[in-house]
Image: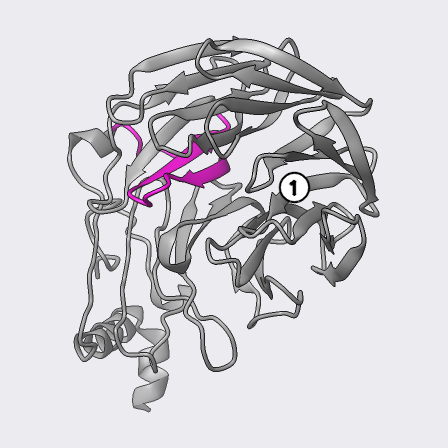
């Protein structure tokens, strides 16, 4: 009878959950508060389109469909600095930090790339690509910025002068770009189902990979030995970028919207239009644990230090996960929910895993309360 009553009474269930959490040795709750966050509590009209961690992991940049970029302070859970305007009139399509963390770049659907100083939010440059930008990436030494263009061009920009250096054209819309760790190769995904590897110095294509469907994301492993290519065909291809040979073909069960390697290269994450994030062994491509239920369609993923993983939600939420090795794979430990509510629960006891069903979104005071009021 008590169990049945608990099922009917969500408040009692929440009390039980709160009691369980009290037994955990370390529980940290980060709540979004203060005037800096108040202006960003309403969901963005077209959701979160892209995410990127700063090199030191202290900031998370989120691009939104309303043409804004918000920098989240991971220590306080508050918006860092002003809301950055990348538009207006064009949704943000890609965000990236420079390797030294001194710049953050955002491309938009109107063909503009804007640079800011993340410390102050001050503008640091505007680049005009001439057509819709679908992705941006800094070279490992920070001297170049690559932009993917809907017109089929990959543009390389000199960061110091904010001028276009050269254009790599291959036809067909470009959907994403990524530099190899040594900066010698640039991978570009195309809507025609191809991924091309460009020699950055010679400005020529050195390999063409067949992805099986329109490419939606490309990413190099930290050691440069693997290139991951995601596609709308529901496939993630792992390739040897030097030889162009396939290493593994991963079946994600639905259209893939983005891919990212963990910073130690042990994990590969793929974002799915079905609302899942799948984790794979970064070397073999074997599945690692069960798919993570991230909500509605996921637009992108990014890894930060310590295995922290961010997923961008089409409904305007960002979820932050910590992947912990061991057992059956990797389990969810940390959460960052909503653009109006930041909640991180850090569990020290390895035997306890918190799932989405145990986290309640506050309806009356977003970002200030842990449980919905009874």
Residue beneath disc 1: 217
Residue in the image at 70% along x and 21% along y: 150
Toward which corner of the image does residue 249 lie, by quadrant? Answer: bottom right
Whether residue 327 is visible to the viewer of this picture, yes or no, is yes
Whether residue 276 is visible to the viewer of this picture, yes or no, is no
Residue in the image at 81% along x and 38% along y: 207
Q: Nearer the viewer, residue 141 or 209?
A: 141
Q: Quadrant of the C terminus?
A: bottom left
Q: Which color scheme is applied?
A: one colour
Q: Which residues are magenta?
A: 39-66
Q: Nearer the viewer, residue 167 or 143?
A: 143
- Horizontal relation, residue 135 to residue 170: left or right: left
Vertical comparison of 274 with 64: above or below: below
Q: Nearer the viewer, residue 58 or 244?
A: 244
Would you call the spot at circle 1 few (<14 residues within 10 Å), some (14-19), or many (20 or more)? many
Vertical comparison of 63 with 122: above or below: below
Toward which corner of the image does residue 12 lie, by quadrant? Answer: bottom left
Q: Position of residue 41 (x, y in %)?
A: 31, 35
- Horizontal relation, residue 315 to residue 201: left or right: left
Vertical comparison of 68 with 275: above or below: above
Q: Position of residue 357 (x, y in %)?
A: 41, 67
């Amino acid at each position: 009878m008590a169990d049945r009553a608990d099922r009917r009474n969500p408040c009692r269930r929440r009390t039980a959950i709160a009691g369980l959490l009290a037994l955990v040795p370390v529980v940290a709750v980060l709540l979004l508060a203060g005037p800096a966050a108040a202006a960003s509590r309403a969901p963005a009209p077209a959701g979160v389109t892209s995410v990127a961690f700063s090199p030191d992991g202290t900031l998370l940049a989120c691009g939104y469909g309303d043409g804004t970029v918000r920098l989240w302070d991971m220590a306080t859970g508050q918006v860092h600095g002003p809301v950055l305007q990348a538009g207006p009139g064009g949704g943000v399509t890609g965000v990236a930090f420079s390797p030294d963390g001194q710049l953050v770049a955002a491309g938009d659907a109107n063909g503009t790339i804007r640079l800011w100083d993340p410390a102050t939010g001050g503008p640091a440059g505007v680049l005009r690509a001439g057509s819709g930008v679908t992705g941006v990436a800094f070279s490992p030494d920070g001297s170049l910025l690559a932009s993917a263009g809907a017109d089929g061009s990959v543009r390389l920009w000199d960061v110091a002068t904010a001028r276009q250096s050269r254009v790599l054209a291959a036809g067909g819309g470009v959907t994403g770009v990524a530099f190899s760790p040594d900066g010698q190769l640039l991978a570009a995904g195309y809507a025609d189902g191809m991924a091309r590897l460009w020699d950055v110095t010679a400005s020529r294509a050195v390999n063409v990979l067949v992805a099986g469907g329109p490419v939606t994301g490309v990413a190099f492993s930290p050691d440069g030995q693997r290139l991951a290519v995601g596609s709308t065909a529901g496939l993630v291809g792992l390739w040897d970028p030097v030889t162009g040979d396939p290493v593994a073909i991963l079946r994600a069960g639905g259209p893939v919207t983005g891919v990212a390697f963990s910073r130690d290269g042990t994990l590969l994450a793929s974002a799915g239009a079905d609302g899942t994030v799948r984790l794979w062994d970064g070397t073999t491509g074997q599945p690692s644990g069960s798919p993570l239920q991230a909500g509605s369609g996921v637009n992108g993923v990014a890894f930060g230090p310590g295995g922290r993983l961010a997923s961008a939600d089409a409904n305007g939420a960002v979820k932050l996960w910590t992947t912990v090795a061991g057992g059956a794979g990797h389990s969810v430990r940390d959460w960052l929910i909503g653009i109006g509510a930041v909640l991180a629960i850090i569990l020290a006891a390895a035997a306890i895993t918190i799932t989405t069903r145990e986290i309640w979104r506050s309806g009356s005071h977003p970002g200030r309360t842990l449980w919905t009021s009874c």
